[in-house]
C-alpha cells in the first residue's frame, strides 16, 4: 500500500560516500584567508601546509616520530606512492574485501609483479587478519568504502612483525580509532570523513617505513611524484609541507577549516561519536523494517562511515533495478543524493554516516527511504 511523502526533509540531503558532506558550519567566506595567487613555497604557503600536517597529527593522535606528508592524487596517489616505493624488498600479503583493495592487488600482482599472496573475502565479509604472514609486507584497507565492512581493531597485527603494514584508511581516518603502533603506512584523502576537497592525499609513515625507504631501492623506475628519498635519505621537506607538486591553497584552507571544526566537536572522540550516532539511527531503522538489511551481517565489522544496505523482499525480481529506482526517487525528491551502491558492489544503497553528517538529517531521511521503498514495490 502506497504511503504519503513524509512532512520533514533533511536540512542537508548530501549522503555521498565521496566527496562527502562538508562540515555543517561550512561557508565559502571562511576560506578568505587562503593565500591565492601566492607560491606554496612562500613563507605563508609553507606555514599553511605545515599547519595542515601538525593539526592532522594533533587530532588523529599520530605519534611524534611518524612522518606526515601531503602528496598528489588523493588517497589513490598516496597508496600507490607507498606501494611503488616500499614493496618488493620481501614478499607481500595482499588483502581485499572490496573494490579498492582489489585494485591494490592488481597493481602489485600485474604491474609491480612481485611475489605476493592474495587473500580475499566477499562483499560484507572480512579476511581473517590473524592468518596472515607478517614476516611479509601486508597491504589492506581498514574500512571497505564500497562494502560497508571495517577492521574491528588491530589486535591481529603483531607488534614484532618483520614486514611492513600498509593501510588504506581513507574512509576510516577521523571516524575510527586507528592503532598507530600497528600501522607502518597509513593513507587517506581530505574529501572523505572531514568533507574536504579532492586531489590531495595524506601519507603517514612509521619509523620502520622510513628505515625501509632509506635502506631499499626498488627494481623498477619511480616517477617523480613517487620519489621520497634522495641519495639514500628521506626527503624531509615533503613531511614539513614542501610538497612534491603544487597543491591548491584553496583546498588547503578548506582542510584547515575542517580540522578546526573537528576540534569544536571534541576532536577524534567527538567525530567517532557523531559517526556512531548516525550509524545507530540506521541500525534502529533496519531492526524495525524486515525488507532491508546490512550488507555486513556481523555488527562487529560494520562500518560507521560507508553504511551499505541491501533490500530483502521476495517481491523484488531485479535487485539492481529496484535499488537504482529507490535511489532515484530519493534523489528526485532532493532528500538523499548519491546513495546508490558502488558500481562493483552488490545491489543496494550506501549511506555516508561520517561525522560531517548530522544525525537529525539521517533521522529525517529514513522515513523517506520507507516511502521510496513502498512506492516502488507497489508501482
Image (spheres, helix red, strand yellow):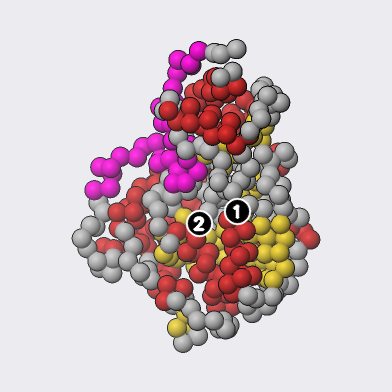
Decide: few, some or many residues near mark 1? Use Cα within 10 Å; few <14, some 14-19, many ≥20.
Answer: some
Q: What residue is shown at x 58% (from left), y 60% (from top)? A: 103
Residue 262, x across and y down, in percent:
44, 44
Queried whether the magenta region covers residue 25, the answer comes back as yes
Kindly identify the residue that appears in the image at 54 percent across and 29 percent down: 326
Q: Residue 281: horizontal and vertical position, in percent? A: 58, 28
Residue 215, compared with residue 287, is above or below; it is below
Magenta segment's dominant SS is: loop
Quarter of the picture holding the N terminus: top right
Q: Can residue 275 be seen in this view?
A: no
Residue name at image x 61 percent, y 65 percent? 106
Seen from the viewer's position, the closer of residues 56 and 311 is: 311
- In which image quadrant can residue 304 be found? top right
Label 2 sits on a secondary structure element that is strand
Residue furthest to the bottom: 231
At mark 1, the secondary structure is: helix
Give whichever of 209, 111 is nearer the camera: 111
Which of the two labelled residues, at mark 1 and mark 2, occupies the earlier sequence position?
Answer: 1
- Residue for badge 2: 188
Instruction: Give the extent of the magenta segment.
Output: 4-32
Circles 1 and 2, Cβ within 8 Å, touching? The answer is no
Residue at image mark 1: 99
Amino acid at each position: 500500500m502506497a504511503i504519503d511523502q513524509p512532512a520533514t526533509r533533511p536540512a542537508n540531503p548530501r549522503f555521498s560516500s565521496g566527496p562527502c558532506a562538508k562540515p555543517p558550519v561550512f561557508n565559502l567566506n571562511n576560506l578568505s584567508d587562503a593565500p591565492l595567487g601566492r607560491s606554496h613555497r612562500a613563507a605563508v604557503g609553507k606555514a599553511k601546509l605545515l599547519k595542515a600536517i601538525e593539526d592532522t597529527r594533533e587530532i588523529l593522535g599520530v605519534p611524534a616520530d611518524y612522518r606526515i606528508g601531503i602528496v598528489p592524487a588523493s588517497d589513490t596517489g598516496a597508496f600507490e606512492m607507498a606501494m611503488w616505493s616500499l614493496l618488493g624488498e620481501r614478499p607481500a600479503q595482499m588483502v581485499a574485501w572490496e573494490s579498492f583493495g582489489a585494485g591494490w592487488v592488481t597493481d602489485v600482482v600485474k604491474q609491480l609483479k612481485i611475489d605476493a599472496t592474495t587473500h580475499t573475502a566477499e562483499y560484507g565479509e572480512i579476511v581473517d587478519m590473524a592468518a596472515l604472514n607478517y614476516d611479509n609486507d601486508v597491504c589492506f584497507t581498514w574500512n571497505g568504502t564500497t562494502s560497508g565492512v571495517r577492521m574491528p581493531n588491530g589486535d591481529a597485527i603483531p607488534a614484532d612483525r618483520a614486514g611492513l603494514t600498509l593501510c588504506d584508511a581513507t574512509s576510516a581516518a577521523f571516524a575510527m580509532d586507528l592503532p598507530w603502533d600497528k600501522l607502518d603506512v597509513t593513507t587517506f584523502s581530505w574529501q572523505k570523513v572531514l568533507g574536504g576537497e579532492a586531489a590531495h592525499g595524506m601519507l603517514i609513515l612509521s619509523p620502520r617505513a622510513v628505515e625501509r625507504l632509506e635502506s631499499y631501492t626498488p627494481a623498477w623506475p619511480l616517477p617523480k611524484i613517487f620519489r621520497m628519498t634522495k641519495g639514500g635519505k628521506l626527503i624531509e621537506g615533503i613531511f614539513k609541507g614542501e610538497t612534491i607538486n603544487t597543491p591548491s591553497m584553496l583546498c588547503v584552507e578548506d582542510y584547515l577549516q575542517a580540522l578546526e571544526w573537528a576540534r569544536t566537536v571534541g576532536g577524534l572522540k567527538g567525530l567517532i561519536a557523531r559517526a556512531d550516532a548516525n550509524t545507530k539511527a540506521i541500525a534502529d531503522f533496519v531492526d524495525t523494517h524486515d525488507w532491508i538489511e546490512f550488507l555486513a551481517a556481523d555488527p562487529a565489522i560494520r562500518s560507521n562511515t560507508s553504511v551499505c544496505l541491501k533490500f530483502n523482499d521476495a517481491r523484488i525480481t531485479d535487485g539492481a533495478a529496484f535499488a537504482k529506482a529507490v535511489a532515484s526517487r530519493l534523489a528526485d525528491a532532493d532528500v538523499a543524493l548519491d546513495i546508490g551502491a558502488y558500481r562493483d558492489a552488490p545491489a543496494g544503497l550506501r549511506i555516508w554516516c561520517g561525522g560531517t553528517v548530522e544525525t537529525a538529517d539521517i533521522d529525517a531521511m529514513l522515513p523517506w527511504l520507507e516511502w521510496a521503498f513502498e512506492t516502488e514495490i507497489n508501482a
